[in-house]
Image (cartoon, rainbow, N blue to C red):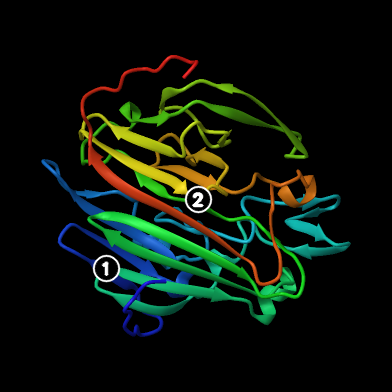
Amino acid sequence: MPGPFGQHSPMQPVEIQTAEARFEVHPELGGWLTSYSREVAGKGRIDVLHSDPDAVARHPKDMWAGIPLLFPLVSFNHVPGAEHHYEWQGQRHALPQHGFARRLPWTVLGTSPDAVAMELVDTPSTRAAWPFSFSHRLEYRLDGGRLVARHAVTNRSPGPMPFACGIHPYLRVPLVAGGDRDACRVKIPRAQRLNPIGRWDGFFGEPFPARDLSIAGDYSGTLFLGELAEPELRLVDPAAGVETVLNWSGAPGFRNVALWSRTPREPYFCLEPWTALPNAFTRAEPGELIVLEPGGTWTAHWWLDAVASHGPSVPRPPGR
């Protein structure tokens, strides 16, 4: 990953600040990016992510803030008679929901005035839960105020390595004090809605026309979408005149997205690009899990931004 990078003291959050934007990441707390704000023309400084010092203090429990990292599992996996377990090549292993990456300390490889690079590698404890040798490198960078992320996962094992990866951004709603959360909406391109059979023992899809989706309802059960016509979602706050943009065009492996909020009253709404769906190891849909050959590297590039809205969006016809 690009440099030059300087040194960073362990156990301290990393703050990166430019004239346009600022973010803070806690490498020792699962590489957790806990805040991101930027200047928006005509709107001032906008806090894009929901930040919560209490959530940081209780890590790794209830990480309802920032952008937790999901690896090597997204959501849950179960096998007959065992919750939060998976099987691979005839062996059964325990793995917590969303994997272990968000729970473990990451090593800072270096910092620059606009970026930080981190790495998570295997240890005896990770190999007990997931028997592979790996490197997961992640760089966060400010590019003209935009938050840009780059992942590189390398298989250092002698055999194939299966995994899933995702991000869990807690996007702030409303974006300005005194705003109306219920008026916020998500601009969604044409997609397929993915519906579980049982506890994700299978699933089926149905057409999901392009729309502006209100976030006022109950999303605690999670809305899953796949086959999006465009790899981008926009969370619009009409009162603020600002929209948050999440784009993963540089991460074609992120084939699905989960929309979630714990309750309709939370000060956040989550838009979560994932490479797989819940119970992916057990369901074993061809191509759903990423399987890296020895020495192989998987990469993903996504970005998050906040921009001024340009008036009300125009509903698009279902066929587009």
- In percent of width and height, residue 164 lies at 63, 55
What kind of residue is marked 2?
A: Ala
In the image: residue 84, left or right of residue 231? right
* Element class at badge 1: loop
203 is higher (above) or lower (below) than 317: below
Which residue is under mark 2?
251
What residue lies at 33% left-to-right and 51% top-to-bottom?
A: 49
Residue 44 at x, y percent in the picture: 13, 47
Quadrant containing the N terminus is bottom left
Q: Name the kind of residue labelled 1 in the image.
A: Asp
Mark 2 or 1 closer to N-term?
1
Residue depicted at 75% across the width and 64% down the height: 94
Q: Quadrant of residue 112?
A: bottom left
* 137 shown above or below 11: above
Q: Which mark is residue 114?
A: 1
Residue under the image location 43 percent in, 64 percent down = 32
- Picture quadrant of residue 201: top right
Residue 192 screen position, x and y as percent: 59, 28
Q: Residue furthest right?
A: 90
Callout 2 secondary element = loop
